[in-house]
Image (cartoon, coloured by chain):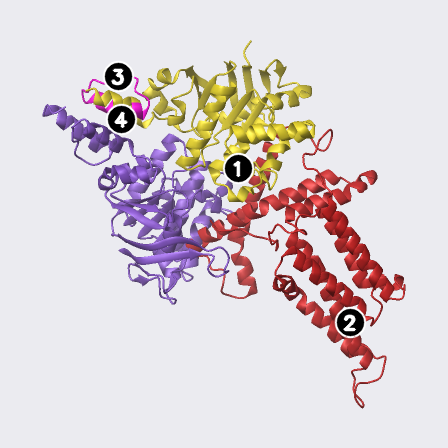
């Protein structure tokens, strides 16, 4: 059985203009899935639905066997699905890093000794052990987001959703966050759903879900997705810079592979000419 | 308006005697009228501090260097900041967060009214309409709406309109494309390009996105620990491979490819725009040098 | 970059800093009671209290000037109440022939000033040696008994801690909005009071909007981390009482006994002065 399953999910904020229309997809354990779509396409709403912050109007969402539509299983769902939101400043509850990481387990009634262990583990996993006693306002944006990830990890989730978590970071911060998330995915087997604008972040995903106006436009591997340059542009998305440049060169008669995605790919291909 | 900074230094926390942080250290920089100038560097490298000097939000301490923006002498305590600020527009990160008025019209008109108390109503209408149209919005349709009910992209445009309404000759933007989706980003940068060929003569952008810098800027300055580490055209700056790596900065894709090809003995000319790179490479191919 | 400080916390590793915040609050309360219980014109009692303040300041390794500075904020109040005593206390004999100032008036003016100053000095040692977060935690522990009367102690404490956490964030945001509006020609420094108040609207409204957004996002982030009120919640932070606190309590008890002894075991009415 899939770890996460959405079936014919519909949702609207005002019961009139639907934001999510008949969305269905599955995510398997250990997958790294990217979700892309233009601003206002409904991709963030999907994150909130999966985490039971919003309730679907119709359709079903199942996480690890628990239904997100069932009021009684809300906490079972939230234990399993952690969300890291966009704004690094608006996710921290406490004024000291370790207290903030403790917030989730405290809510679950985890015994104190166990919380201490979880804080250790979570801060280790995001490489922020040295900042245990720091105040958040002394941290950079990237560090704050790593603390936010630690706060989610302390709940021992099976899925982590990054809801544009890197959008407000500088390149160094973005790199740090992505490195941490990839490590968690590879080494701890945490399933990752990354909602993002940055096409460069999509390249290394196992699968990509493209959302357009509340519906699923297409699902596929990054290579499959970025082969449809024209359609992507129509729905407000673009190719990674490397693919864009490669396509321009191919138009000019260069013999390059058609599925260049990353900067490294293009560099290699050009050097082989 | 030409901008000249000479030995400009600035220290935070000097007044309070708290931990003082040297944010700028002997900065010498000239930005010519007509430049599309890029400023890059790590967070905390001093770029924001520098940029905020340009319209007097941060004042030059008389003893710590000179700064001239056109005819304005920023080191002079009596410098007419109001007029200066009408000529040097500044757009902060996420400018949509500064919107406050009941209608788009009122919000855009705010700057105009603050700069010029005696301006006539008809003049205001004219200028607001011009600003809103310039940023690519429909004046009639949007002027009476509340700025808070607009979409994210529209809000940002309205915020820009509120800055360019005073027809600044210099426009400074801090990370202008942050938070926009790819197409929104491209449209927005094209808007800047359009502005650059209107009354705005000089555009200065602070950005972490090297591909934007290489695509749009004719000159770049790299800040590092309050000093200018490199300055020149994008080609010149990113040709200094070791320095860029030492500073821990990224390369624009085109610069990266050029370096890779150079290591293989192929010199690609042209500038660092995608267009320029493709043209230069095609030429090499035709000449059979690839 | 800019260090955002609020309150007047003076970080150090001293004996006093390491004491338990709740105990420190209790000690300050006991100290204030002692100051207030000093019998009219028994200046020796004040001498004992001053000695206590000086000793604690020295042990806390806080510059004495910093403690004295706290008087600056209430200097007006001190002068005002002294003047009141000086001119309106008609008991006792006039200081000079036909004068309107009496010896009692002068004495009580000095007495009141010293009393108020001592209270403020004591309280400021507390805020100098205890960070706002520790204070909030300390208050929470002290409020715990109120649970019996269904006072929402946990919620109250959470509100305090979130408020403290967001002060630096809001200050940064305010700074940014002020700069943005200044760049658009806003003028906050000229004109009459009404004009200046009006000039703040372009700052206050965006600030309000952004606070609401922060509150919304924080609420989502808290929900996502399984927050469900105080029910079945554990607390990671332990309020630890050490030998330091015992010593502190013993010395404070000594102070109270000494003052009461000076008063000739006369304590009650003065407390309510």
Q: Give the SS element for disc 3.
A: loop
> In the depicted view, which residue is nearer to us: B197 or A101?
A101
Q: Are marks 2 and 1 in contact (CB under 8 Å)?
A: no
Instruction: Give the residue at mark 2.
Output: C111
Residue stretch rendered in magenta on the structure: A247-264
**Tag 3 residue:** A257
Residue placed farthest to the bottom in the image?
A: C97
Q: CA distance from mark 4 to mark 2?
A: 83 Å
Q: Chain of mark 3?
A: A
CB under 8 Å between discs 3 and 4: no
Q: Residue at x 78, y 87 (%)?
A: C99
Q: Main secondary structure of the magenta part?
A: loop
**Left or right: C26 with respect to B151?**
right
Question: Image point 54% across, 11% down: which residue?
Answer: A2
Do callouts 1 and 3 point to residues on the same chain? yes
Q: Chain of mark 4?
A: A
Estimate how packed mark 1 is, as few (under 14), some (14 to 19) or many (20 or more) residues with alpha carbons within 10 Å: few
Give the image location of residue B68, x and y in percent. Answer: 30, 60
Left or right of A42, for residue A200:
left
Circle 3 packing at 10 Å, graded few (<14), some (14-19), many (20+), is some
Q: Residue at x 74, y 69 (%)?
A: C114
Q: Which mark is residue A130?
A: 1
* Residue under pointer 4: A245
Q: Nearer the viewer, mark 4 or mark 1?
A: 1
């Amino acid at each position: 059985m899939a770890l996460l399953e959405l079936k014919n999910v519909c949702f609207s904020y005002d019961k009139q203009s639907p934001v999510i229309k008949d969305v269905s997809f599955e995510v398997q354990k250990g997958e790294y899935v990217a979700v892309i779509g233009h601003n206002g396409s409904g991709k963030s709403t999907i994150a909130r639905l999966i985490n039971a912050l919003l309730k679907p109007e119709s359709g079903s969402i199942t996480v690890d066997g628990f239904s997100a539509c069932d009021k009684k299983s809300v906490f079972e769902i939230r234990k399993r699905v952690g969300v890291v939101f966009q704004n690094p400043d608006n996710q921290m509850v406490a004024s000291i890093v370790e207290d903030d990481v403790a917030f989730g387990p405290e809510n679950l009634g985890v015994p104190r000794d166990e919380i201490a262990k979880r804080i250790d583990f979570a801060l280790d996993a995001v490489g922020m052990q040295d900042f245990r006693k720091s105040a958040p306002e002394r941290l950079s944006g990237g560090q704050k987001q790593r603390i936010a990830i630690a706060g989610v990890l302390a709940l021992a989730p099976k899925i982590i959703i990054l809801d544009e978590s890197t959008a407000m970071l500088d390149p160094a911060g973005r790199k740090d966050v992505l490195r941490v998330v990839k490590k968690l995915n590879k080494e701890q087997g945490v399933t990752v759903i990354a909602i993002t604008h940055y096409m460069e972040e999509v390249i290394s995903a196992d699968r990509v879900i493209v959302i357009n106006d509340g519906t699923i436009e297409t699902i596929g591997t990054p290579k499959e997705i970025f082969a449809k340059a024209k359609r992507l542009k129509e729905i407000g998305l673009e190719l990674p810079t490397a693919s864009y440049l490669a396509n321009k060169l191919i138009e000019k008669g260069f013999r390059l592979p058609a599925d260049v995605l990353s900067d490294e790919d293009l560099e290699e291909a050009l050097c082989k000419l | 308006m030409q901008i000249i900074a000479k030995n400009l230094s600035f220290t935070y926390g000097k007044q309070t005697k708290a931990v003082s942080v040297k944010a700028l250290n002997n900065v010498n920089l000239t930005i010519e009228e007509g430049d599309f100038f890029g400023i890059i560097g790590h967070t905390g490298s001093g770029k924001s501090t520098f940029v905020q000097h340009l319209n007097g939000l941060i004042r030059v301490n008389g003893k710590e260097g000179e700064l001239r923006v056109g005819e304005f002498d920023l080191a002079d305590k009596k410098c007419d900041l109001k007029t200066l600020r009408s000529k040097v527009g500044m757009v902060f990160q996420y400018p949509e967060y500064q919107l406050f008025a009941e209608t788009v019209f009122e919000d855009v008109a705010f700057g105009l009214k603050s700069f010029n108390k005696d301006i006539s109503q008809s003049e205001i209408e004219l200028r607001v309409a011009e600003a809103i149209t310039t940023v690519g919005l429909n004046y009639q349709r949007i002027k009476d709406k509340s700025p808070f009910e607009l979409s994210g992209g529209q809000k940002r445009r309205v915020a820009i309109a509120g800055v360019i309404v005073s027809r600044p000759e210099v426009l400074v933007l801090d990370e202008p494309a942050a938070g926009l989706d790819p197409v929104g980003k491209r449209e927005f940068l094209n808007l800047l390009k359009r502005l650059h060929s209107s009354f705005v003569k000089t555009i200065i952008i602070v950005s972490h996105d090297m591909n934007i810098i290489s695509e749009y800027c004719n000159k770049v300055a790299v800040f590092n620990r309050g000093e200018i580490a490199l300055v020149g055209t994008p080609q010149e700056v990113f040709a200094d491979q070791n320095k860029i790596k030492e500073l821990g900065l990224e390369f624009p894709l085109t610069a990266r490819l050029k370096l890779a090809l150079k290591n293989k003995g192929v010199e690609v000319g042209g500038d660092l725009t995608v267009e320029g790179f493709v043209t230069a490479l095609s030429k090499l191919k035709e000449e059979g040098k690839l | 970059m800019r260090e955002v400080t609020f309150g007047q916390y003076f970080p150090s590793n001293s004996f006093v800093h390491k004491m338990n915040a709740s105990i420190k609050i209790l000690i300050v309360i006991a100290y204030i009671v002692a100051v207030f219980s000093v019998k009219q014109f028994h200046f020796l009692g004040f001498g004992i209290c001053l000695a206590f303040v000086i000793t604690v300041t020295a042990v806390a390794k806080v510059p004495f000037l910093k403690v004295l500075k706290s008087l600056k904020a209430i200097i007006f109040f001190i002068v005002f109440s002294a003047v009141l005593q000086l001119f309106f206390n008609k008991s006792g004999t006039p200081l000079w022939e036909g004068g309107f100032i009496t010896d009692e008036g002068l004495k009580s003016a000095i007495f009141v000033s010293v009393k108020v100053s001592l209270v403020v000095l004591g309280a400021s040692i507390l805020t100098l040696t205890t960070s706002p977060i520790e204070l909030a935690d300390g208050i929470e522990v002290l409020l715990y008994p109120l649970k019996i009367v269904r006072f929402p102690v946990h919620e109250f404490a959470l509100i305090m801690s979130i408020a403290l956490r967001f002060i630096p964030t809001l200050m940064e945001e305010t700074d940014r909005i002020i700069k943005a509006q200044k760049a658009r020609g806003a003028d906050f420094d000229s004109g009459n009071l009404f004009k200046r108040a009006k000039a703040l609207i372009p700052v206050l409204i965006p600030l309000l909007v952004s606070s609401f957004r922060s509150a919304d996002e924080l609420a989502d982030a808290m929900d996502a981390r399984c927050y469900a009120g105080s029910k079945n919640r554990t607390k990671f932070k332990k309020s630890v009482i050490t030998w330091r606190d015992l010593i502190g309590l013993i010395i404070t008890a000594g102070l109270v006994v000494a003052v009461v002894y000076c008063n000739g075991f006369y304590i009650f009415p003065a407390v309510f002065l």
